[in-house]
């Protein structure tokens, strides 16, 4: 049995103005949350708001979150309490929030989502891995809806080390201000039809394989080079550039009435190819 | 004792990130957990660390903690009684 | 048995219970070293919570020989985290038991799906301490961290290709990793999967659990009325999974099968489980429902429970077990964390292996140090000095995690 996997909506969250985009009614629930968690919640909130007002999330809704480093910043702030205040005096709140899956836990709790919540990391594109798991879960009928999130947050220690590694012994200027952001995709089973979904962006078929190492490039088969280049976006962490690029390519292609987007990314550690059949038959419902 | 209570209220607002309240808004007899201020079990263990850090008073286990943490009054009394 | 079943062709493990599968089998019967004060070679601490430490050198002589024969240089191994070494040891044991030819691995799609918590954190306190003071320490700790994804490391050491993933679902990671790998095989994403979990003891996690007041200064007593908390442990548990048809084609026999997997969220609290374990109930029901050939609750002969020994976990878990099995007999259940401690990301991997071992043995010994069950529980585990002959060869291994995740595997041992 194989159900189509429909992209209901895509959100990109710029972390630079995070506090201004956190929904007011969630502030109390987010009082202990760090920026990483807030990014995930803001993305999830925007995705869920894109559903038609009459429908709510079905019981079999899953959360899939991919991140390269999790909230390293919170990890370091916990270490600060350990180093400053001593053993037995470290902050339990910071420790529990530094675990990678705390963000998915918040999304589950704040939006009352009781299905699977999976947090994954890879050394390449964890968002795409999360997308692959979500796509399969829907295609095989385990889920009807999936929130797929990619959340990344730079941290000064890693930024500084990276700059130093690249520059060698030269004295460096200040590393850039920490960047953070999130992308979110709402996937819905094709069999969920009619008034339970809005016209969206297309169905997705995801392939992944490893090839011989080549230079990093992003190639889209059917989109012209006028697509915005991720590196021009100041707020976007390096690890999020690929998810952001794909997250822009899909609605862009859809808006141009392309029938199909074949998007791929190749890097030293492998290649990923995403094929999206774009939805151009749906009428716009009010 | 009043100064201690004020310190505790400031600690709650600033370090426990209670939303939408100033220290002055917290009543001495308002329940800290459950329906009052709305703290939960994770806040309770954080409070244990903060009480030790700011007042050098250790809470051995959550049985002890439960009694001390009822409200600002009980917390202030507990600290007064157990200060070194 | 359908030829499509996901078979277990090998298993490997290392923890405080011992250096290999045989040692873990004996540990189930009560012969295991137990917990200790934190060894100096692990880290220095002023706290007195005991831990379950694995051997100082995770790699056995046999494993080192295997690695040398595959031309994996010592210099590479020297750079790896303790978590990676524990994983490699368990994986090599499992591959050896599965009679997997290393050369043939290179021509297959090999999936690697592993759970961890400590293994993906930045743990180098010395680097951080210097760096935050404004010093600029030498970079190797950061480079190690950036290159330290445990599944990628194993992929590199084995020199294989295929999907790789690290699951960071806290204490349920190992269970989830095995469930995901099962899915990979069923959707033909790989020909063979190496799945499980690993975690090393870390001063950071040790302090974290201490500050959460979840750790016990005495040896843990899962499900016992006197329980006061968990003891941390370390190790790795890994299984080799293949389609049964593939396994038989290469002349192998299954040790058992992974028949089902389910996972669900409490949506309740960042660290505490739902008091009735509502997410765990759903996870168990989904796991049972996912078994292709159909399964009745009465087919479950054993539950390897999460059983950390914290007041709240054990209460929630017994509530969930009683609720799920309310319409019939409750299967015998035990926790093996009295033997290994709570190994975090490794727990799901180690406990899947323990479940398989017990089902193979056809008997379960009682939960270590559970002498007096909590009278408030709706059901009781098998007690320390009891033994129960198992009524069948199907069992469940389940995990509850921070963030409210709950996961469950349905496993069967071959006769």
Image: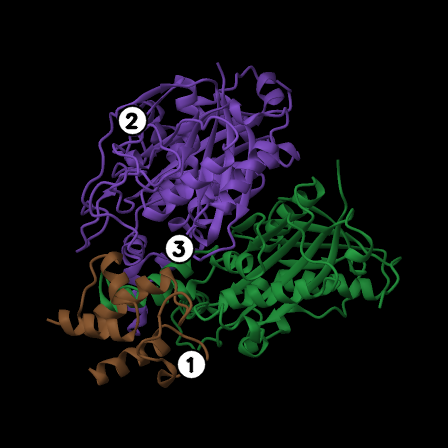
Chain colours: A green, B brown, C purple
Front residue (pair A165, C378):
C378
Residue A173 locus on image (x, y percent): 44, 79
Front residue (pair C105, B80):
B80
Q: Residue furthest left?
A: B84
Seen in the picture, residue B38 relative to C240 is either above or below; the reply is: below
> Dot 2, how many residues are within 10 Å of its Cα: few (below 14), some (14-19), or many (20+)?
many
Task: Pick whichever of labels 2 and 3 is earlier in the sequence.
Answer: 2
Under circle 3, the secondary element is: loop
Please tell me which residue is depicted at 74% across the width and 64% down the height of the picture: A53
- The residue where tag 2 is placed is C27
**Number of the label disc, if any, that sits on residue C15:** none
- The residue where tag 3 is placed is C121
**Left/right of residue A17 with respect to residue A194 in the rendered view:** left
Task: Tell me the subunit letter for badge 1.
Answer: B
User: Gap in Å between the C-alphas at discs 3 and 1?
Assistant: 35 Å
Task: Tell me the subunit letter for badge 2.
Answer: C
Q: In terms of image quadrants, where is residue C138?
A: bottom left
> Dot 3, how many residues are within 10 Å of its Cα: few (below 14), some (14-19), or many (20+)?
many
Mark nearest the camera among 2 and 1 is 1
Front residue (pair C393, A158):
C393
Under circle 1, the secondary element is: loop
Front residue (pair C102, A244):
A244
- The residue where tag 1 is placed is B21
Please tell me which residue is depicted at 61% across the width and 33% down the height of the picture: C290
Task: Tell me the subunit letter for badge 3.
Answer: C
Mark nearest the camera among 2 and 3 is 2
Q: Classify the position of the N terminus of chain C by image quarter.
A: top right
């Amino acid at each position: 049995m194989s159900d189509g996997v429909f992209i209901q909506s895509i959100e990109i969250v710029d972390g630079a103005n995070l506090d201004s985009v956190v929904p007011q009614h969630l502030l109390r629930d987010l009082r202990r949350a760090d920026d990483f968690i807030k990014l995930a919640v803001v993305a999830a909130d925007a995705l869920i708001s894109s559903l038609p007002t009459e429908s709510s999330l079905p019981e079999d809704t899953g959360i899939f979150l991919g991140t390269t480093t999790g909230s390293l910043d919170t990890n370091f702030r916990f270490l600060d309490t350990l180093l400053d205040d001593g053993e037995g005096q470290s902050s339990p709140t910071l420790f529990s929030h530094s675990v990678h899956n705390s963000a998915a836990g918040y999304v589950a709790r704040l939006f009352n989502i009781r299905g699977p919540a999976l947090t994954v990391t890879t050394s390449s594109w964890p968002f795409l891995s999360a997308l692959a798991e979500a796509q399969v879960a829907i295609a095989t009928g385990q889920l009807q809806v999936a929130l797929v999130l990619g959340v990344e947050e730079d941290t000064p220690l890693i930024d500084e080390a990276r700059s130093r590694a690249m520059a060698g012994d030269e004295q460096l200027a200040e590393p850039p201000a920490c960047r953070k952001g999130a992308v979110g995709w709402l996937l819905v089973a094709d069999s969920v039809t009619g008034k339970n979904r809005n016209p969206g962006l297309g169905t997705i078929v995801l392939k992944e394989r490893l090839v011989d190492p080549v230079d990093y490039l992003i190639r889209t088969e059917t989109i012209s080079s006028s697509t915005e280049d991720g590196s021009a976006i100041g707020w976007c962490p390096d690890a999020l550039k690929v998810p952001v690029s794909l997250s822009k390519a899909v609605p862009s292609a859809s808006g141009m009435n392309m029938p199909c987007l074949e998007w791929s990314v190749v890097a030293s550690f492998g290649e990923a190819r995403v094929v999206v059949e774009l939805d151009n038959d749906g009428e716009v419902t009010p | 004792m009043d100064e201690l209570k004020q310190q505790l209220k400031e600690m709650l607002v600033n370090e426990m990130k209670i939303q939408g309240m100033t220290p002055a808004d917290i009543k001495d007899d308002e329940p800290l957990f459950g329906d009052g201020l709305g703290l939960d079990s994770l806040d309770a263990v954080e409070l244990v660390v903060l009480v030790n850090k700011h007042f050098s008073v250790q809470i051995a286990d959550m049985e002890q903690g439960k009694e001390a943490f009822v409200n600002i009054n009980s917390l202030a009394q507990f600290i007064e009684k157990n200060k070194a | 048995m359908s030829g499509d079943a996901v078979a277990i062709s090998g298993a490997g493990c290392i923890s405080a219970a011992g250096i290999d599968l045989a040692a873990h089998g004996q540990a189930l019967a009560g012969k295991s070293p137990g917990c200790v004060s934190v060894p100096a070679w692990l880290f220095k601490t002023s706290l007195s919570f005991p831990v379950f430490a694995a051997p100082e050198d995770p790699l056995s002589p046999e494993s080192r020989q295997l690695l040398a024969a595959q031309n994996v240089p010592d210099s590479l191994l020297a750079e790896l985290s303790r978590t990676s070494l524990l994983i490699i040891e368990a994986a090599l044991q499992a591959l050896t038991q599965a009679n997997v030819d290393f050369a043939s691995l290179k021509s297959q799609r090999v999936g690697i799906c592993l759970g961890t918590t400590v293994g993906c954190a930045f743990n180098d306190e010395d680097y951080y301490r210097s760096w935050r003071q404004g010093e600029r320490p030498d970079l190797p700790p950061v480079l190690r961290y950036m290159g330290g994804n445990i599944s990628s490391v194993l992929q590199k050491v084995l020199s294989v290709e295929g999907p790789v993933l690290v699951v960071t679902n806290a204490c349920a990671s190992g269970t989830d990793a095995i469930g995901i790998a099962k899915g990979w095989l069923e959707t033909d994403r790989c020909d063979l999967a190496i799945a499980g979990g690993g975690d090393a003891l870390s001063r950071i996690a040790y302090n974290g659990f201490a500050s959460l007041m979840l750790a016990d200064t005495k040896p843990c007593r899962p499900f016992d009325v006197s329980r006061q908390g968990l003891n941390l442990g370390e190790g790795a548990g890994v299984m080799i999974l293949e389609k049964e048809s593939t396994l038989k084609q290469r002349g192998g026999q299954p040790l058992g099968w992974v028949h089902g997997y389910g996972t669900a969220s409490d949506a309740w609290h960042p660290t505490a489980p739902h008091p009735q374990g509502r997410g765990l109930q759903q996870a168990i029901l989904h796991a049972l429902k996912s078994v292709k050939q159909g399964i009745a609750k009465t087919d479950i002969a054993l539950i390897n429970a999460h059983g950390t020994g914290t007041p709240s976990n054990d209460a929630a878990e017994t509530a969930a077990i009683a609720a799920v099995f309310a319409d019939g007999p409750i299967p015998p259940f035990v926790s093996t964390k009295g033997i290994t401690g709570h190994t975090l990301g490794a727990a799901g991997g180690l406990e899947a292996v323990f479940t398989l071992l017990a089902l193979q043995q056809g008997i379960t010994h009682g939960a270590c140090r559970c002498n007096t069950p909590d009278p408030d529980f709706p059901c009781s585990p098998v007690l320390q000095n009891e033994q129960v002959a198992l009524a069948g060869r199907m069992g469940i291994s389940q995990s509850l995690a921070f963030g409210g995740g709950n996961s469950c595997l349905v496993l069967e041992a071959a006769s």
